[in-house]
Amino acid sequence: MAKTEIESLRRLRDMPGALRRARRRKPGRRMNGTAVNVRGTIRERNEARILKAAEAVFAKKGFNGASTAEIARKAGVPKPNLHYYFRTKQLLYAGVLDNILEIWLDAMDEIRPGAEPAEALARYITRKLESSRLLPEPSRLWAMELISGARHVEPFLKKRLRRLVQQKSAIIRAWTEAGKIDPVEPEHLLFMIWAMTQTYADFAAQIAAVLGKDKLDEGVFAAARKTMVSLVLKGLRVR
């Protein structure tokens, strides 16, 4: 993955996602016809700080076990300030999940009409695996949410994600029809890529222990990427 893409991932990690865009903001003051953006900058910085603390607490304790008081302490802000930005724990939880979802969905854009399967699949695997390296806690939180029944994200799964998987599956089927890859069930191919890449975040402790490491380093992720890309491309006999 290029350095600019890694930096883009880090920037996405440190900013609120679609939840921020959906919430109504108070307009900034105007001076000589120009909006003063200081308030907006402070808000974004504070929201990012709170979300970063929230993802760590939620990933450790889940939605029910986490409290906004603990998240506020970890973020270093008074509890009333936290509730100024996120009125409820549900909104805060949604904001944390939203960040990782936007990154994962953006990575799926590698599978697009006109793309060659070898490059598209290799880049998609690389981006998903890099998000596991840089953003492990949101990935673990997502796994916990699904294991507990996906109550908070079920509408997303059944609507937006389902539509997106259908679109990407149509592209993969077109590759098969064009003789570029062997026949495959596209949905299950995507499920397997998700499982392979996200396990390096969700089960990092297991992998590190087996490899005799304190934590997963760049060498581990490089080896994982090489193995995954090789397995997928050779398994599909990409032409």
Image (cartoon, rainbow, N blue to C red):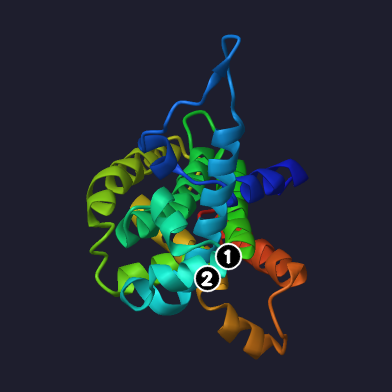
Residue hosting label 2 = 73
Instruction: Look at 50% across and 38% down and name the residue there.
Output: 109
Instruction: List the single residue furthest toward the top.
Output: 33
Of the pair 80 and 2, the residue shown nearer to us: 80
Quadrant of the image occupied by residue 175: top left
In this view, 205 is above or below 24 = below
- Identity, as a three-letter code, of the amino acid under mark 1: Gly
Q: Nearer the viewer, residue 28 or 195?
A: 28
Task: Name the foreground residue: 118 vs 55.
Answer: 55
The image's mark for residue 30 is none
- Residue 154: x percent and y percent? 24, 57
Badge 1 crowding class, 10 Å Cα cut-off, few under 14, some 14 to 19, many 20 or more, is: few
Q: Quadrant of residue 118?
A: top right
Residue at 65% of width from left, 62% of height from top? 225
Q: Is residue 219 above or below residue 185?
A: below
Quarter holding residue 210: bottom right
Does residue 3 appear in this view?
yes
In percent of width and height, residue 129 lies at 59, 60
Tell whether 165 sits left or right of 127: left
Label 1: state its secondary structure.
loop
CB-based contact (under 8 Å), mark 2 and mark 1: yes
* Direction from residue 92 to residue 111 in the image, left or right: right
Mark pair 2, 1: CA separation: 5 Å
| Residue at x 61% of width, y 33% of height | 38
Q: Quick one: quadrant of the C terminus?
A: top right
Q: Amino acid at mark 2?
A: Arg
Q: Which residue is labeled 1 in the image?
A: 76
User: Is residue 64 found left or right of 199 in the rendered image?
Assistant: left
